[in-house]
Amino acid sequence: MEPGLGKEGALYLASKNVMAVGADTWGLEVLPFEPGVGVFEVHQILLAKNGIYILENMNTGAMAKDKVYEFMFVLGHNKYKGGVQSMINPVAIH
């Protein structure tokens, strides 16, 4: 079991034209899936249908401890073409 984003939340975020969605969990969306929701449908809504990047396993513990709520988020690009997922190293500048 994993807490996470549900279908309604994904549709709401897509309607707001967000660029990226992140979570501190490995799968972003709630598991087991909500009743009537398809397999990784939240991923499909965000990434495949709306081009919204998904960031998983984000470690924001130190920022929360320091009560950092506003920061510049910097994310570099992959150094290869055609990949579907990758390990990245985002940076928060406060």
Image (cartoon, rainbow, N blue to C red):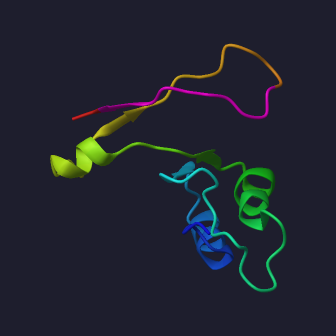
Which residue is situated farthest in the front direction here? 1
**How many marks on residues?**
0
Is residue 37 shown left or right of residue 71?
Answer: right
Quadrant where the C terminus sits is top left
Left or right of 79 in this view: 56: left
Q: Position of residue 5 (x, y in %)?
A: 58, 68
Can residue 70 be spotted in the picture?
A: no
Residue 27 location, x and y as percent? 64, 54
Q: Nearer the viewer, residue 9 or 16?
A: 9
Of all residues shown, which one is farthest toward the top? 79
Q: Is residue 63 left or right of residue 39?
A: left
Residue positioned 58% across, 66% down in the render: 2
Please check the rendered image and state whether residue 91 is part of the magenta-colored stretch, yes or no. yes
The residue positioned 55% from the left and 55% from the top of the image is: 18
* Residue under the point 60% across and 57% down: 28
> Which image quadrant is residue 45 in?
bottom right
Instruction: Identify the main secondary structure in magenta.
Output: loop
35 w.r.t. 57: above or below: below
Q: Position of residue 12 (x, y in %)?
A: 59, 73
In the rendered view, would you say 13 is above or below 35? above
Q: Tell me the quarter of the picture where residue 78 sits.
A: top right
- The stretch of residues the image draws in magenta is 83-92
Quadrant where the N terminus sits is bottom right
Question: As rendered, which of 24 and 73 lies closer to the eye?
Answer: 24
**Residue 39: within the magenta?**
no
